[in-house]
Image (spheres, coloured by chain):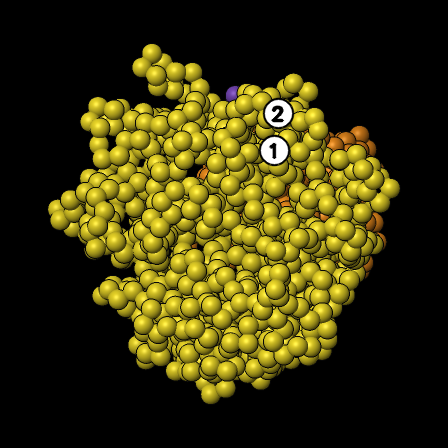
Amino acid sequence: MANDNTKNRKAILVTPEVCIGCRACQVACKSWNQLPGIKTKNNGTYQNPPDLASAAFNIIRYSEVPSEKNPVRWLFVSRRCMHCDDAGCMKICPAPGALYRTKEGAVAFDRDKCIGCKLCVNACPFDVPRYDADGKVTKCHLCFDRIGAGMQPACVKTCPTGALRFGDRAELVSTAKKDGFGTIYGEEDLGGLGTVYAFKEEPKLYGMTDDPAIPSSVVFWHTVLKPFAVAGLGGVVAAAAIHYLAVGPHKEEEEV
Amino acid sequence: MTNHWIDLKNADVILAMGSNPASNHPISMKWIMRARERGAKLISVDPRFTQTSAKADLYAPLRSGTDIAFLGGMINYILEKNLYFKEYVVNYTNASFLVSPDYKGPADLDGLFSGYNKEKRSYDKATWSFQKDENGLALKDPTLQDPNCVFQLLKKHYARYTLDKVTNITGTPKEKLVEVYELYGSTGKPDRAGTECYAMGWTQHTVGTQNIRAMTIIQMLLGNMGIAGGGINAMRGESNVQGSTDQGLLFHILPGYNPVPNAALPDLATYIEKNTPTTKEPRSVNWWSNRPKYITSYLKAIYGTAATKENDFGYGWLPKLDVGQNGSWLNLFDKMHQGQFEGFFAWGQNPACSGANSNKTRAALAKLKWMVNVNLYDNETGSFWRGPGMNPKDVQTEVFMLPCCSSVEKEGSISNSGRWAQWRYKAVEPPGQSWPDAEIMNDLYFKVKELYKKEGGAFPDPILNLTWDYGEKDTAGKVKHIDIHAVAKEINGYFLEDVYDMKATPPKLIGKKGDLVTSFPSLQADGTTSCGNWIYCNSYILKDGKEVNMMARRGKDDPTGLGLFPGWSWCWPVNRRIIYNRASVNPQGEPWDPKRPLLKWNATKVGPTGTPGAWEGDVPDGPAPPMGTDGKFPFIMKPDGVASIFGPGLNEGPFPEHYEALECPLEENSMSKQRINPTIKIFGGESDAFYSCDARFPFVATTYRASEHWQTGCMTRHCSWLLEMQPQNFVEMSVELAKELGISNGETVVVVSGRGEVQAVAMVSERFKPFKLENSTVHQVGLTWHFGWQFPEDGSGFDSANLLTPTVGDANTMIPESKAFMVNVRKA
Amino acid sequence: MTEMVRKSSGDEILNHWVLAVSCILLIISGYGFLFQTEAIGSLFGGFNTMKTVHNWVGVVFILSLLFSMRHSFKDALEYDEDDRQWFKVAGGYLSHKVKVPPMGKYNPGQKLYYLAILGAGIAIALSGFAIWLVQGNQTLILISHLVHNVSFCIFIIAVPVHIYLSTLANPGTFQIMVNGTLPLEVAKKRYPKWMKAAGKM
């Protein structure tokens, strides 16, 4: 389901270099989406909730990596739905409209249409979709309701430093490059992500998935098995028809 | 702040020391990151590698409580390497002033200044004075060579702060010190601006005021005061702390920083004489010479027609402190603990968790007869009687809860750290029976007034004579509802008579009776004007016959490009966005940095008085021409007109000197024999115990905030979204210390001090490192103070870190020393 | 009156139709899921209901399939020389001219078909249950998803073949699955070895 309308494609540009880990984005998201608070405990890290959850569409991942000049490097990265152009979740989803593409290029969801099969969870290269208490899919939807009305996503609106920016995808990417960010994570991956990251270093350092891809079984299923099933059904019906016409039904008297 | 939030973007070097803006003032980081985009450098100096450190270009660790050593080393480095801005130092500071030859400093007296009285723990400051000529003007040596000049004394004082010495005190690696000094020292060039952002990391020490003084000396040496991208910037801990100090919330100041009178000042004339600085320097503006106008207009504002010339404008009705009385927090609660109070209004605060040595605070509350808790929520203070260690049966305190509105449920102004008074509107109706604070005060006032009327009382005049014209009155004379605009206008002030400028011929009408005063130069000392707070005069003005609330302005023009936004809200004084801005130009009125002109003297432009010559840019510190012509000195609030490198006003001495915290890990202060600040008040009560170099409490501790919570968490702990991110009190420690104690990350531990103990989740990381000092290794831990036993109700958040902090305060302000004390950590 | 021979018992017939109906329902709904076919979804009253139907019919299907082993499993495992010969002439399906060896109750095509359906049926059911019930095991679910869909391909090809062969291609066969009997004369022609073993020839 590639989104061919790339001209109008919107995106969030995450620049971890300017993220200060204040987590206003996490609160803004919960506020706009009226998500319930999660009962958590401190696990010896600032990161909380520990990962995305049905009531946490985005989190800041805090990671510590060695540093030459300081005791440590402390990195803050916004983790959320990547809004892949070639979205594994949409690909595998059996329910039409449960996961859908908005005109801005976001992968949004419709709770009423979700059948709760959870396949999307497993087809996502980034382990993003979650299920709520009713067994319905939830995840970041790029504030489709806000951006559709000409506003910024809640997280972007609240980000004080510009670590999250929203806008025209092509423009965001070219600006980031102009600003000296050599690596744009997600520029080409999966047909181009709708959440792109600007790095000056290896994205892996920030815990980004190397070469993200939809699981090969899902790709095989999608590109081979699905057409094969149609072809097989069509073939067997055609073969039966040909057989019926060419050979004809079994006749008892022909038997000896 | 001398500058303001947006101005941070104009800096070339930003020193975040004594603060953690990324966690605690995220919006400031917007502008700091904006500066970094331009190539500015961010320096983070902190005991712990913080979120700010993570964004910094340069990080240097230091042991809590050693900032003066660190900064003293910087002063020494700047002087040794000639990094200071000589023209600025000579012209705009008192560096050239000659100090009395009787003055002696710590270099001579092993850690003390001349005039120390050991019994009183205070100084006779007589020797901390300048040599004067026959006209009463300070003697100066513009070459800065005289051994008694401030500059040479400064040099001598800080020559002791060598890199080796400093590194052995602070635990900062020597090469990091040099890097910081070199980078920050680079702002001594005229076209470079350096700014400092501090918060409680500097103030909450026994040497808190001197921490800041040390930095101001650096800023003066580097010529960073008064310029765009410079200044000393206090990042306030609450959105309206600036406003509350402006409006006289502290015990020692009336609105507009007029001192609270004491018993030795029986009448207005004495008060004025004692509190109005004089100068013989004809070119000094000495703005505080206007004190008589401000105090008189204030008295007229609060006592109205009852204040007459004959009765000293009601000066006698103002409450007076006893001579030497200090009514600050620690003393209040000490007295309360001794049972000297009957009642207490805990208004918008949670002392059971916020006050240092909370066990003492909680015990003190139990000595009260009654307490009124005015808050959004019931909290650990309102419910102290059922808190840990309390037996409700034994507590006789009667507690009343008055629910009040949050800021979005009422209209009014707040003043941010950058002195911007911003008008806010009511967004939603308050829930339930909660009232705006002003309405509660209104009810309370009329009830008290009624009692005074009925019963007389010891001294009814101050209450009965108060003006209270804040809205429509009912038949009994009570204001039905507070009109907050009426309050704002009273703060701005009115002309009570037709006021004329008598210097003009013929006398020119300045203001008509009943009109709002336009700005404070129009205020009078004869009772013809009223003004609730002179620095807010000009915030609500009469323009073209209409009353205009300047604080509600939302203009987005930025004519200078420096982010001053003069049409957005209103800023005291008189919308001056950067104070002491006349120091941003050279004596001829040319900006030091032509690329960042904050002000510029235009000799041909017609000025406000109709003569040629006017300032362009920010609202200048007075219309006078630059000092190089026939103008005035730039530091208009100082009697000498220049900034004080030698500052005799503080209690510990004219130059900041390193002393260890009251509780410290070292037997000796390696700077001198004087281990602790010689002028702090030592509380002697049983609950005030302190332990230095005691094996039972071997680790330095500090407290701080996280982004997710606010203050004691009274508001934020009730928000499940915030609690989700930061659910429990935690104590951060180094991997090395955790290993020594057998503590693993995420484990619940108990932190113990000489005053109490608190549980917390251990957060073990490389972000804390042990400090390597000359002969020892010092471990430090840090805790948040956002939690309290009452909520979350299951107690999972643990209690307040202030159960650990000591009862000791700064020698000038009495702010408690919550940022450096000693603890132990054990497994739960 | 024509003498009839009973080929299928009542319970076998019932089970066959339970299996057939469930299988068809599963194929149709499965097709709907595979291609997000709105029309099919609306047949079931929406995708949510269709999912419930698919899951529970799946339970019926696998129970029915396992139940069928009682009747067919043993036969399906036994092959003789005639069976091998049967393959050589492709069961006579491609030409009515070739000589087809004598068959027992089931021809090897039917037997292998049964085994294929049994195998694919168990695979599709187990993988289906995994998708339905297992959480948090991505590898298992992705393998299950693949197995489910490969099995589906087997079904979507095999089932129409079965329907064709048992209806249009072999008139009279359908009757057996209705009343369980066929005329003795027909039986003798079609299943001589069975009839001989039963002593009817």
Q: Nearer the viewer, residue A104 or B64?
A: B64
Q: Which mark is residue C8?
A: none
Q: Read off the residue under disc 1.
A: B522
Q: Nearer the viewer, residue B404 or A153?
A: B404
Q: Quadrant of residue B357?
A: bottom left
In this picture, residue A4 sits left or right of residue B49? right
Q: Residue at x 40, y 31 (%)?
A: B310
Q: Which chain is tinted yellow?
A: B
**Is B167 situated above or below C201?**
below
Colour in which chain A is drawn: orange
Can residue B565 be seen in the rendering of this structure?
yes
User: Which amino acid type is marked by label 1?
Assistant: Ser
In this picture, residue B579 sits left or right of residue B312? right
Q: Quadrant of residue B325?
A: bottom left
Q: Which mark is residue B511?
A: 2
In this picture, residue C138 sits left or right of residue B41? left
Q: Nearer the viewer, residue C111 or B226?
A: B226
Across and down, in percent, residue B673 comes to 42, 82
**Is B828 situated above or below C178?**
below
Q: The C terminus of chain C is located in which quarter?
A: top right
Across and down, in percent, residue B539 comes to 59, 32
Across and down, in percent, residue B134 comes to 61, 64
Subunit of label 2:
B
Residue with the most extreme right position: B604
